[in-house]
């Protein structure tokens, strides 16, 4: 424990640089009376062609914005960076627990493992497809997982991956959190009367794996004049616009680019339901689907595919259709157009799902509980090892 008697946690997380959502969880964790939190993030981060500078903000707890080497290199991109100043910082802080929001094959995970000293190691994992990594990353994963004290897992598939690669310790499930101050329901949302056009929506990257082609095909087949609004950018945009023209959907589909979180929330509130129709491929299986809980926090139910974690995250707050099945999606859309009561019921369940499972307080609880269990386990092991053998 730190000199204050609180559990000292050093969290290392590159997502904290790239988005405010990646930092909000730490405000809730740091506010806990028995936690002494220090957050480490890259001073500059590169992602999806963007260069992001860590914002100079006062969160009320120590944030260490450190330079990194190799911010993106080769096919492994985000997993080869490391912090030259991490050794000195960990010596100064002497943490009880190092909590990594990084995959176990990353160079940062190896670095933390080698420099951990007395600290327990807790790793948060998202990767949900089991595949053999190129050298030296497979060896790094085996080495790190064999010495990890506790895993925070985004999904059962992610748990299966670390189990298959040698991890045998305790696992705590962890979701993402949603900013309930931004993603709020409409003040007075009335059930849309029969005959008024329903509006579907999508928010995210415009890539073929997100299944928007299936949505356009379902819309073209539907007997109902339903609209689809798309917010996002990506390499598949030109193809989608072409398909809209080919299917004669120009007056029913609109596409616009990214916007601020507040504008995204306003966009979501304008919908009747959100779509997330991700398709499973050799390289893609939906790890979570953060936009699901953002929509549900706004009281908007979600139509999701069977891909990866989507069914579990959606829960009772929406509907699940098979991947790559525009016919089944079309059938569901026609049913919803007729039965508007379904929409209202699932909207209530959507908001309840978020409040029960995906608040930042729930995320902070998962992190604290895992870190505390790891510290107690490691402390207990040190005590046992230090006890002298008793003579018979």
Image (cartoon, grey):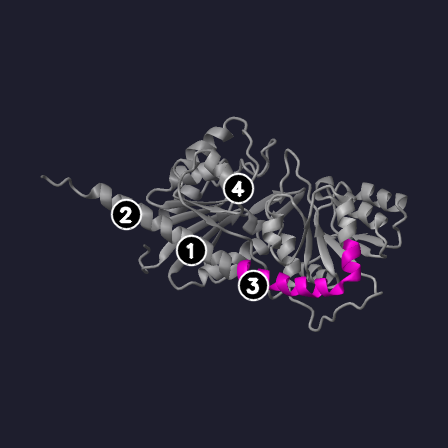
Could you tell me what secondary structure mostly forms the magenta stretch?
helix
Name the disc covering residue 380, or none: 2
User: Residue 204 in the image: x percent, y percent?
Assistant: 70, 49
Decide if residue 240 is on the left or right side of residue 314: right
Q: Which label's residue is closer to the chain start, 2 or 4?
A: 4
Who is closer to the viewer here, 15 or 180?
Answer: 180
Mark 1 vs mark 4, foreground winner is 4
Q: CA distance from mark 2 to mark 4?
A: 28 Å
Residue 368 inside the magenta-drawn segment:
no
Q: Of residues 181 and 357, which is closer to you in this image?
A: 357
Q: Which residue is mark 3?
A: 355
N-terminal of the two: label 2 or label 3?
Answer: 3
351 is within the stretch colored magenta: yes
Give the CA distance from mark 1 to mark 4: 20 Å
Label 2 vs label 3, nearer the camera = 3
From this view, report whether residue 32 is shown above or below residue 314. Answer: below
Q: Are marks 1 and 2 in contact (CB under 8 Å)?
A: no
**Image coordinates for residue 95, horizontal then vertical, percent:** 37, 50
Residue in the picture at 69% in, 58% down: 260
**Residue at the bottom extreme?**
188
As drawn, the label of residue 368 is 1
Lower sequence index among marks 1 and 4: 4
In the image, taking residue 133 as reference, residue 223 lies left or right, namely right
């Amino acid at each position: 424990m730190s000199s204050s008697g609180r559990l000292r946690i050093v969290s290392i997380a590159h997502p904290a640089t790239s988005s405010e959502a990646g930092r909000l969880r730490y405000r809730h964790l740091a506010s806990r009376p028995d936690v002494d939190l220090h957050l480490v993030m890259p001073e500059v981060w590169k992602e999806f062609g963007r260069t992001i500078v860590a914002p100079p903000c006062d969160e009320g707890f120590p944030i260490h914005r450190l330079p990194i080497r190799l911010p993106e290199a080769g096919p492994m991109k985000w997993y080869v960076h490391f912090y030259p100043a991490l050794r000195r910082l960990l010596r100064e802080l002497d943490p009880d627990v190092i909590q990594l929001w990084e995959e176990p094959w990353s160079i940062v995970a190896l670095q933390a493992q080698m420099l951990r000293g007395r600290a327990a190691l807790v790793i948060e994992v998202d990767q949900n497809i089991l595949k053999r990594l190129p050298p030296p990353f497979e060896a790094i994963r085996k080495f790190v997982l064999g010495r990890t004290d506790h895993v925070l897992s985004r999904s059962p598939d992610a748990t299966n991956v670390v189990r298959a690669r040698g991890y045998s310790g305790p696992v705590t499930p962890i979701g993402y959190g949603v900013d309930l101050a931004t993603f709020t329901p409409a003040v007075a949302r009335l059930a849309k009367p029969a005959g008024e056009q329903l509006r579907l929506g999508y928010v995210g990257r415009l890539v073929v794996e997100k299944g928007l082609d299936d949505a356009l095909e379902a819309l073209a087949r539907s007997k109902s004049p339903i609209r689809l609004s798309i917010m996002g950018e990506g390499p598949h945009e030109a193809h989608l616009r072409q398909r809209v023209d080919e299917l004669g959907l120009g007056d029913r589909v609109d596409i616009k680019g990214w916007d601020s979180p507040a504008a995204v929330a306003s966009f979501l509130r304008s919908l009747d339901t959100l779509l997330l129709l991700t398709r499973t491929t050799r390289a893609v299986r939906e790890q979570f689907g953060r936009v699901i809980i953002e929509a549900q926090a706004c009281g908007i139910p979600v139509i999701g595919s069977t891909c990866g974690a989507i069914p579990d995250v959606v829960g009772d707050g929406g509907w699940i259709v098979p991947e790559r099945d525009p016919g089944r999606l079309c059938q569901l859309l026609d049913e919803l157009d007729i039965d508007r009561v379904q929409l209202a019921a699932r909207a209530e369940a959507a908001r309840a799902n978020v409040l029960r499972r995906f608040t930042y307080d729930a995320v902070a609880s998962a992190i604290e509980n895992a870190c505390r269990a790891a510290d107690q386990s490691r402390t207990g092991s040190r005590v046992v090892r230090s006890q002298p053998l008793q003579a018979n």
